[in-house]
Amino acid sequence: VSATDPDCGVNAMVNYTLGDSFGKVRDFEVRSGSGEVCIAGVLDFETRSVYEFPVIATDRGGLSTTAMVKIQLTDVNDNQPIFYPREYNVSLREGGGSSSSSSSPVVVVAATDLDSGRYGSLTYRIVSGNDAGLFRIDRDTGEIFVTRPSLLSSRTSPYHRLNITATDGGGLRSVQDAEVFLSVTDSAQRPPIFEKSRYTFAVKEDVAKNTIVGSVNATSSDSGSRGSVRYSIYSGDPDGYFSIDPLTGTIRTASALDHEAHQSVLLNVQAMSGDPPAYGHTQVNIGIEDVNDNAPEFDSNTVRISVPENLELGIPLYAAHARDRDSGRNGVVTYRLTSAAGGTPTGGLFAVDPRLGHLTLARHLDYETAQRHSLIVHATDTGEPPLSANLTVLVEVQDVNDNRPVFERAEYTVDVLESLPVNSQVLQVTAIDLDTGNNARLTYRLLGDKNYTHHDDKKPLAPAFLSTGGDGSEDNIFGIFPNSGWIYLRQPLDRETRDQYMLTVAATDNGTPAGTATSRVSVNVMDANDNDPVFTHEAYEFTVEENQGRGALVGRVAATDGDLEVNAAVRYSLIPSNSSFQINPVTGMKFPSMVLLLMEVKSIA
C-alpha cells in the first residue's frame, strides 16, 4: 500500500500500521516504512480464504488516513481425501434376489476433500477384493453395484471385502482406503426391517448430555438367537453428537450440541441380525434447534477511520458489521450509537442505520472545532435474552481548505523616511488561516507585482530576486518576503517626486483550491533634509547712494528649498562678514552698501 503526503521534510514521512485489534490471528503484517504487506503466519485456505483489514498511514505530525486491504487466498492441493465412515456393512441375497439387483446400488461410499475446485473433486476405484468381477463402482458417485448377481452364494462365498480408494483432481489419494463388508445370506434369511424408512426428531442445542432424542425399532422374521436385533450408527455423525442403545434403539445426546456447526444431523442407522449377519438400514434426521447462545461479534474491538470535514450528510463513512452465529431471530442484529456514559455520543454528529450498520453524518464536521471523535457502535441481537457487543470507532477528521486567510487589519498605514536605505524592512503584514498543515501555510505577494522573487527570510537585508520585466507593484519600489509578510524597499524613495504609495498585498494558502485574502497598505513618504537651498538668481546687483544712512534698505535676495516645513526654512548670512553691510537672516534684506556682495544662505536644519 502507498500513501502520499504533500507536506515537506519530516512532515511528509509516512509510517504504516495495521488497524487496531485486526482479527484474532495476526496472519499478516505491514512494514512501517515501505507499506509492504507481508505474511506473518501460516495461511490455510480451508480455514479462511478472504482477509479484509485496515491499514493506517500516519505522518510525523500525527495526521492519518486509512485504506482497506482485501486479500483473496488461492487454494493449493494440500489436503488428501478422507472416507467417513471407513467401514460399510451390507447384506446381499444369494442367487440374484431383489436386494442385489444390478440396477440399484447396494451401498454408497463417500469421501471428503477440504480443498476447493478441481482439487476437491473425487473419483473412486475398487483396489482389491473384486478378483471375480462381481462388483463395480461408479467412479464419480461412489455407488457400488452387483454386476453378476447369479454368482452370489452363501455357501461358497458368504463374505466379500472390498477396498475402495478415492483420488482428488490433483492426484492425491485418500489417507486410508474404505472397507466394504458384504455378507451373502440364503434365500430363507430375511434382514431386519425398520418400522420407518426415515425417522425425524428435534432437540435444542443446549440440552444436557444423555438426553433422549428418540427411538428406532426394527424387527426380524427369524426366530431364536438369529432373530435378535442389534442397532448401530454407522455414518452421518462425524462429531459424535449422538449414541444409540444397541439393544433398544434409543438415541441419546453424547456430547454438547452446536446449532451453529450443524443445524441438523442425518444418521445412518443399521440393524443387524442372524449369522451370517443380515442388515437393515434406516435414516434418522435430527434437527438441532437454535438457542440464543452466541453474542454478535465484530471483527475487531476498535477501528480508526479518517473522514474529510466536508463530507456530505448521509453518505456512509463506515460500515459496522457484527456477525451472530445464531439463526432466525437469535441471529438478527440491530445497531445503535452509544457513549461510555450511555448517552448520545458527540452531540448528535453521527448516526447509524439500525439494520445495515452504516455510519453516517447527521451534522457537518468542523476540523477547527474538533479533530477527533470517539463513537461506540452497540450491536444487539433480537434473541431472548438479547446479547450484544460493542465496537469503538475512532474518527480522525481530515482538514480541508474551508477557511480563507484573514488579515489582522483590513488596511495598514506606515510612515517611511525618504532616506530609508534600499532593502530596509518597512512593515510586516500578517494573515491567519484557521485550517492546518498546507491549508494554513500562507504565501504573501504584492498584487500587480510582475517580478518573480526568491527570498530568504532569514536574510532580510539581502533579498535576491529575479526580474522578469513589467511595471511591477508601484514601479517595483517595494517588495515582500513571501513567507514572513515583511514589505521591504527595493528602490530609493524621493518624497519630492512622490509622497504616498498605495499597495495591495495578498495572502494565499497552499490548499486546493487555494484561498486568498487581500489588504491595503498606505505608505507615506516622510521628508528628509536632502535638498540644498537654491537662490533664485546666480548673482544679484544693487546700487546705493553714498549718503544713505545706517539701516537703509539696499535690496533683497531670495532662495528656495525643495524640502518641507522646518527642512525648507532658509536663513541668510554674509560671507565673509562685513561691518559696512548687514543682511536680515530671515527675509534676505540687505543694508548699505557696496558694489558686489558675496552672500551665503544656510538651511536652518
Image: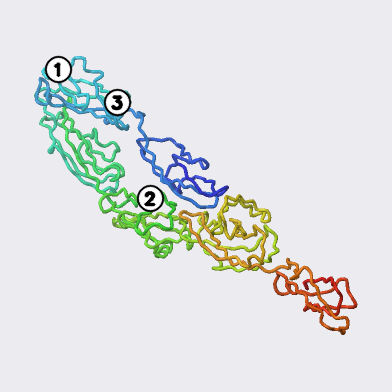
Residue that numbered label 3 is attached to: 169
Tally of numbered discs: 3
Residue 159: x and y in percent read 19, 20
Residue that numbered label 1 is attached to: 155
Residue 134: x and y in percent read 17, 18
Residue that numbered label 2 is attached to: 298
Q: Are marks 3 and 2 in contact (CB under 8 Å)?
A: no
**Measuring 27% from the left and 49% from the top, which residue is drawn there?**
327
Based on the displayed image, in which of its 4 quarters is residue 525 positioned? bottom right
Q: What residue type is labelled 2?
A: Phe
Which numbered disc, 1 or 2, marks the residue that appears first in the sequence? Answer: 1
Residue 563: x and y in percent read 71, 70
Query: Neighbour class for label 2 at 10 Å: few (<14), some, many (≥20)?
Result: some
Alpha-carbon distance for marks 1 and 2? 66 Å
**Which element is circle 2 on?**
strand
The answer to whether residue 89 is left or right of residue 572 is left
Residue 379: x and y in percent read 35, 55
**Which element is circle 3 on?**
loop
Which numbered disc, 3 or 2, marks the residue that appears first in the sequence? Answer: 3
Q: In the image, is residue 362 above or below residue 28?
A: below
- Foreground residue, 293 or 247? 293
Q: In the image, is residue 340 above or below residue 163?
A: below
